[in-house]
């Protein structure tokens, strides 16, 4: 180094003595070093959960097809090929979101019937209230409900990634609900009549959700109130809500 240059010079935040970094400076630099876009290590299960979470955020903001797969890859700090290791295409991504957040959530009808906290001293639940809570929950996540209904139509194709999920869903839901104890009027204490009522209620719920997507004049909750009055009419259901 030229003699006119001071022996100690500034180099960014590091100090060089005679053109060399000191050991103390190098140790400090190493401890503070945070590489840009450093990959985070996750198990495959954790990574899929992360992808589903970020995808649901993007769906809520932009719609099911309003963002690119590259945008999602950036959000989860993966390359596009890395993302496609977990979800090969958008259809698989949407299926993953549905399976993670729609029917597999902690308070879902697969795992925990909404309204269980209101069971009577015999552990019996109110069917009208439990179904209403499901509708209220879906009202709070309209974008996911829309995705769910659209995928239900697409998944009729046996080759669709969500086909098996939808094919099993009806049986799983009905079996789950029939396994619970419901406080119902005497005519519905017959298992077959109760099953018919539950099946009809879920037909109505799917229909209400489709109607809410196409009818700007009434909300999902308002439409369900109409169905509720037909499914659980007064005075028969008074005292069972």
Image (cartoon, rainbow, N blue to C red):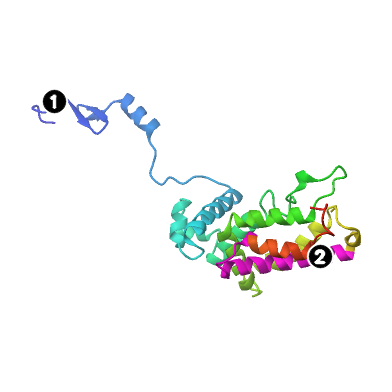
Residue with the mark numbered 2: 197
Residue 146 picture quarter: bottom right
Counting residues from the start of the chain, the first of labels 2 and 1 encountered is: 1
Magenta stretch containing residue 194, yes or no?
yes
What quarter of the picture does the N terminus occupy? top left
**76, above or below 17, in the image:** below
SS of the residue under disc 1: loop
Give x and y (percent) for residue 221. Answer: 64, 59
Front-most of 200 and 219? 219
Q: Which residue shows up at 56% across the image and 55% down it?
A: 52
Q: Which residue shows up at 62% across the image and 60% down it?
A: 98
Decide: few, some or many residues near mark 2? Use Cα within 10 Å; few <14, some 14-19, many ≥20: some
Disc number for residue 34: none
**152, above or below 236, in the image:** below
Q: Are marks 2 and 1 in contact (CB under 8 Å)?
A: no
Per the model, the C-alpha gap separating discs 2 and 1 is 89 Å
Overall secondary structure of the magenta section: helix
Residue lying at the far left in this picture: please name it: 4
Give x and y (percent) for residue 47. Answer: 56, 50
Magenta stretch containing residue 93, yes or no?
no
Decide: few, some or many residues near mark 1? Use Cα within 10 Å; few <14, some 14-19, many ≥20: few
| Magenta stretch bounds | 192-221
Q: Name the side, left or right, on which 131 lies relative to 213.
A: right
Give x and y (percent) for residue 2. Answer: 10, 30
Disc number for residue 6: 1
Tell me, yes or no, if residue 169 can be seen here.
no
Residue 192 picture quarter: bottom right
Q: Which residue shows up at 35% across the image and 28% down it?
A: 28
Residue 109 picture quarter: bottom right
């Amino acid at each position: 180094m030229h003699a006119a240059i001071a022996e100690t010079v500034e180099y960014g935040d590091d100090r060089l003595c005679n053109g060399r970094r000191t050991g103390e400076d190098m140790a400090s630099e190493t401890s503070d070093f945070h590489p840009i876009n450093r990959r985070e290590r996750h198990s495959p299960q954790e990574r899929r959960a992360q992808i589903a979470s970020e995808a649901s955020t993007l769906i809520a903001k932009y719609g099911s097809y309003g963002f690119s797969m590259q945008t999602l890859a950036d959000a989860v700090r993966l390359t596009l090929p890395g993302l496609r290791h977990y979800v090969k295409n958008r259809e698989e991504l949407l299926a993953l979101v549905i399976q993670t957040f729609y029917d597999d959530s902690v308070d879902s009808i697969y795992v925990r019937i909404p309204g269980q906290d209101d069971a009577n001293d015999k552990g019996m639940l109110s069917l009208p209230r439990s179904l209403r809570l499901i509708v209220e929950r879906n009202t709070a996540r309209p974008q996911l409900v829309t995705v769910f209904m659209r995928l239900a139509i697409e998944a009729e194709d046996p080759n669709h990634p969500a086909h098996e999920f939808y094919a099993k869903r009806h049986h799983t839901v009905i079996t789950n609900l029939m396994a619970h104890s419901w406080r119902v009027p005497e005519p519905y204490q017959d298992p077959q009549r109760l099953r018919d009522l539950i099946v009809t209620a879920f037909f109505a719920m799917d229909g209400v959700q489709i109607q809410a997507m196409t009818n700007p004049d009434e909300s999902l909750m308002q439409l369900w109130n109409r169905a509720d009055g037909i499914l659980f009419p007064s005075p028969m259901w008074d005292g069972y809500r």
